[in-house]
Image (cartoon, helix red, strand yellow):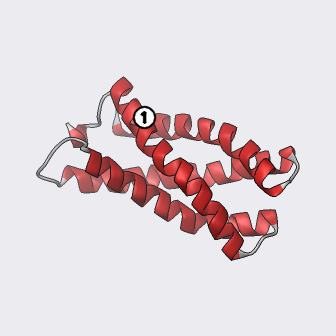
């Protein structure tokens, strides 16, 4: 599978599950209409999808220059932390405006999402690699 096809497939599958989880979670957490939080989840997912592609491209460029090959737990941990940390910074203003909450509240909400997505990103990437194989940068 080409690196581009791999990135697109990985990001698409990742975000489908994310929308299914985040929409209802936001509705419950903020007592908002399901339609509104589902739409927000789609917007957040679209932003995350773009970030996912860009971040994985940067990560794989870095990874290809490393002398140690493979994806150890530490490397997966770094991947998850880098992806989710960047995403929190990007999503805070969007959530603040959409949900009509302060940036501090949006940050706290993002921390809750971060906990879920941190472990989800590691588990998803591991499962994806097991099913589709690791990319050439890690082989």
Does residue 24 appear anywhere in the picture?
A: yes
> What is the total number of numbered labels drawn onto the structure image?
1
Quadrant assignment for the C terminus: top left
Q: Is residue 18 left or right of residue 57?
A: right
- Choose top left, top right, bottom left or bottom right for residue 15: top right
Quadrant assignment for the N terminus: top left
Q: Residue at x 66, y 53 (%)?
A: 44
Closer to the camera in the image, 46 or 68: 68
Where is residue 84? Give x, y as percent.
Answer: 49, 57
Does residue 1 appear anywhere in the picture?
A: no
Other residues around mark 1 within 10 Å, as few (<14) / some (14–19) / many (≥20):
few
Where is residue 130? Give x, y as percent.
Answer: 34, 27
Q: Is residue 127 left or right of residue 12?
A: left
Q: Residue at x 40, y 60 (%)?
A: 82
Closer to the camera in the image, 34 or 111: 111
Q: Residue at x 85, y 45 (%)?
A: 35
Q: Point out the residue furthest to the right here.
A: 33
Residue receiving disc 1: 5
Q: Is residue 27 left or right of residue 41?
A: right
Where is residue 122? Give x, y as percent.
Answer: 41, 43
Q: Residue at x 47, y 63 (%)?
A: 85
Q: Point out the residue furthest to the left here.
A: 67
Q: Secondary structure at mark 1?
A: helix
- Choose top left, top right, bottom left or bottom right for residue 89: bottom right
């Amino acid at each position: 599978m080409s690196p581009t096809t791999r990135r697109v497939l990985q990001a698409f599958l990742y975000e489908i599950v994310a929308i299914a989880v985040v929409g209802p979670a936001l509705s419950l957490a903020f007592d908002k209409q399901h339609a509104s939080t589902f739409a927000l989840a789609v917007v957040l997912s679209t932003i995350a999808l773009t970030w996912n592609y860009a971040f994985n491209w940067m990560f794989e460029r870095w990874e290809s220059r490393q002398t140690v090959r493979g994806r150890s737990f530490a490397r997966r941990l770094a991947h998850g932390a880098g992806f989710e940390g960047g995403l929190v910074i990007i999503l805070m203003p969007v959530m603040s405006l959409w949900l009509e909450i302060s940036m501090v509240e949006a940050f706290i909400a993002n921390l809750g999402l971060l906990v879920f997505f941190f472990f989800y990103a590691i588990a998803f990437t591991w499962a994806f690699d097991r099913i589709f194989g690791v990319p050439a940068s890690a082989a």
